[in-house]
Image: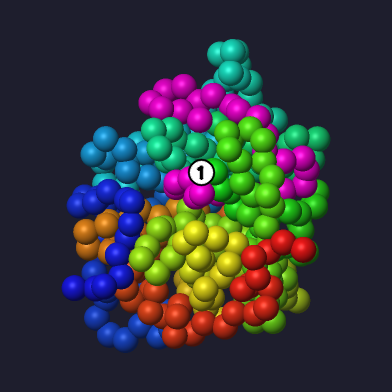
């Protein structure tokens, strides 16, 4: 039995799982689902592609918020349910958001959502237009009414993800300040709030590195998993090549009480585009992590990631193995281990 444990997270005995395939896995101990992609093109009426989406357990089954690229080219967020977290029933209309007075309040566009439960409330975050690329947030307790709350930051910012509990009394969010286009730079920052309205105490977490797969920019991925080793973070790293950007998946472990401090950070990618559905699509060569489902009893982790801006796929790992790999291949730099304030 592993000494490394998932903390403050329920058991999910019905989570999706596929045992490691026979033979040697070269590199990180993470393996793809043999039936990938789990969401193909043209998944529902008027939606050409679903990708970069987030899921989680709910009432014995599973729910998700999905980036749906409509046939008119505008991305919106769709809601879906599943009994097994593999086969999804996605609603044909985008989520109809309301403001805090219950009035309709739709974003102009919305993409790359995350979904995190903090205490008794579920929050979904996405990138939207707030007179420039910025972060939008909505809350729900029943997945019937999604109420938008104040945008946390002014433009330009993307890749927001909440920690699944308060730290030192505050809500904590990762984000990646950016520009209005296809950002050719970017580090992960952390911000704190006492009430999900006013955000401050900003800290630098970690930046791009000299490793090829994350030499251009990095950004938050799935919600951090609290473990006895620290916060396990799956994030994306981007390389610039002569044929465009390449998005890979990396892993780090952040300090449990001060998560702007990086304890371990794998210099190697955990997953990079190698399969046809990762290399070939609307935007080729993308593996983009957005969510995990994890079981605190067994340490099993299912990682959901977008592929080539065209599909949703699934990979698996085990807590003790992935943590051991990150620690064994860790390279941290001075600005990783700082508190992140200057």
Q: Residue at x 30, y 70 (%)?
A: 4
Q: Residue at x 64, y 49 (%)?
A: 191
Q: Which residues are magenta?
A: 139-168
Q: Residues within 10 Å of mark 1 (few under 14, many from 20)?
A: few
Q: Which residue is mark 1?
A: 169
Assign the C terminus to one quadrant of the image: bottom right
Residue 236: x percent and y percent? 58, 64
Q: Main secondary structure of the magenta part?
A: loop
Answer whether residue 50 is visible to the viewer in this image.
no
Assign the N terminus to one quadrant of the image: bottom left
Which residue is at the front of the view, 334 or 168? 168
Q: Residue at x 24, y 50 (%)?
A: 12
Residue 176: x percent and y percent? 68, 55
| Residue 216 sits in quarter | bottom right
**Can you name the residue that lies furthest to the front here?**
168
* Residue 160 is a magenta residue: yes
Residue 44: x percent and y percent? 46, 36
Element carrying mark 1: loop
Answer whether residue 3 is visible to the viewer in this image.
yes
| Residue 34 sits in quarter | bottom left
Residue 48: x percent and y percent? 55, 42
């Amino acid at each position: 039995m592993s000494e490394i444990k998932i903390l403050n997270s329920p058991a999910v005995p019905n989570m999706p799982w596929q045992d490691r395939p026979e033979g040697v896995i070269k590199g990180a101990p993470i393996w793809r689902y043999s039936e990938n992609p789990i969401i193909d093109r043209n998944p529902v009426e008027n939606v050409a592609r679903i990708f970069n989406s987030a899921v989680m357990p709910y009432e014995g089954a599973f729910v998700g918020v999905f980036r749906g690229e409509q046939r008119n080219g505008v991305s919106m967020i769709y809601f879906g349910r599943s009994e097994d977290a593999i086969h999804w029933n996605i609603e044909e209309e985008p989520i109809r958001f309301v403001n805090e007075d219950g009035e309709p309040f739709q974003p102009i566009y919305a993409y790359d959502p995350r979904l995190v439960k903090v205490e008794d409330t579920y929050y979904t975050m996405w990138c939207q237009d707030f007179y420039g690329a910025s972060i939008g947030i909505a809350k729900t307790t029943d997945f019937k009414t999604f109420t938008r709350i104040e945008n946390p930051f002014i433009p330009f910012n993307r890749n927001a993800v909440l920690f699944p509990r308060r730290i030192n009394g505050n809500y904590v969010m990762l984000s990646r300040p950016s520009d209005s286009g296809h950002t050719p730079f970017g580090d992960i920052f952390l911000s704190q709030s006492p009430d999900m309205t006013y955000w401050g105490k900003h800290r630098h977490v970690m930046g791009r590195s000299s490793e090829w797969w994350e030499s251009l920019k990095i950004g938050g991925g799935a919600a951090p998993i609290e473990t006895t080793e620290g916060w396990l973070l799956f994030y994306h790293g981007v390389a610039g090549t002569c044929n465009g950007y390449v998005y890979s998946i990396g892993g780090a472990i952040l300090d449990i009480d001060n998560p702007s401090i990086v304890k371990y950070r794998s210099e190697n990618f955990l997953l990079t585009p190698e399969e046809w559905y990762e290399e070939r699509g609307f935007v080729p060569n993308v593996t983009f992590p957005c969510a995990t489902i994890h079981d605190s009893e067994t340490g099993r982790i299912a990682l959901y990631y977008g592929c080539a801006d065209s599909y949703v796929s699934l990979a698996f790992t085990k807590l003790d193995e992935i943590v051991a790999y990150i620690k064994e291949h860790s390279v941290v730099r001075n600005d990783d281990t700082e508190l992140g304030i200057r």
